[in-house]
Image (cartoon, rainbow, N blue to C red):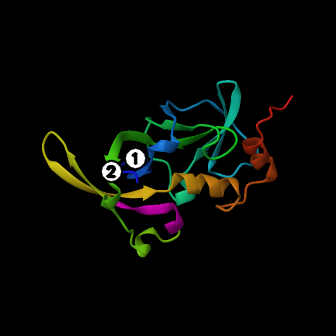
Amino acid sequence: MQDHLTLVEILLGKDHYLIDGDIVDKFVRPLMTVEVYDAPPYIEGMAKWGDDMIPVINIAPLLGMDRADTKRQRTLIIPEGVVSETGMAVSVDDVFNVRTVIPSDIMPADISAVEGIEEYVKGLIRLNIETEEKQEELLLLYLNLHKMLTDLLKGKIARPAPDFYVWRWDNSRQSQ
């Protein structure tokens, strides 16, 4: 049994969330994307990563929120084999901290507080944050990013993804 979880604190819109750190390979600056015609709002486009073209996904619209008005956007690189046969990128408004949490610190989320996204919330986590002037207590939603991305690839979220997008993401062969 795992005695602790490594979580990444991210900013989506105006709110902070926690996601599993074990599915993220790297945090990088926003990637230059090539727009995909008629893509749903959560697909920012395709980006060059190493020798591959990978999809760049913005999960904020999947959760019913807008992007924050910040210039400090970050991209999380999800390596191949974690969610799909190819790598992928997830665009967030910012990355703050990598935190270690004990599983017993995860509290169940009130269904009314997460209505519409309950299957993508693993729970609530209370964090004590010390700043220079005071100590704050935050209550953050712990999101199931892996399930969110898996359901997105299966076409279960928002507008079903056309076969073209699914083929591009799941097919490791590059087009000639």
What residue do we see at 75% from left, 49% from top? 166
Residue 7, label in figure = 1
In the picture as drawn, the residue positioned furthest to the bottom comes out as 112
- Please, is residue 42 above or below residue 122 in the view? above
| 168 relative to 65 in the view: left or right | right
In the picture as drawn, the residue positioned furthest to the right comes out as 176
Q: Quadrant of the C terminus?
A: top right
> Regarding mark 1 in the picture, which secondary structure is present there?
strand
- Sequence order check: which comes first, mark 2 or mark 1? 1
Q: Position of residue 126 (x, y in %)?
A: 28, 58
What residue do we see at 20% from left, 52% from top? 136
- Check if mark 2's residue and mark 1's residue have beta carbons within 8 Å: yes
Q: Position of residue 84 (x, y in %)?
A: 67, 45
What residue do we see at 35% from left, 49% from top? 4
Q: Which residues are magenta?
A: 117-124
Residue 47 painted magenta: no
| 50 relative to 10 in the view: left or right | right
Residue 153, label in figure = none
* Residue position for label 2: 101
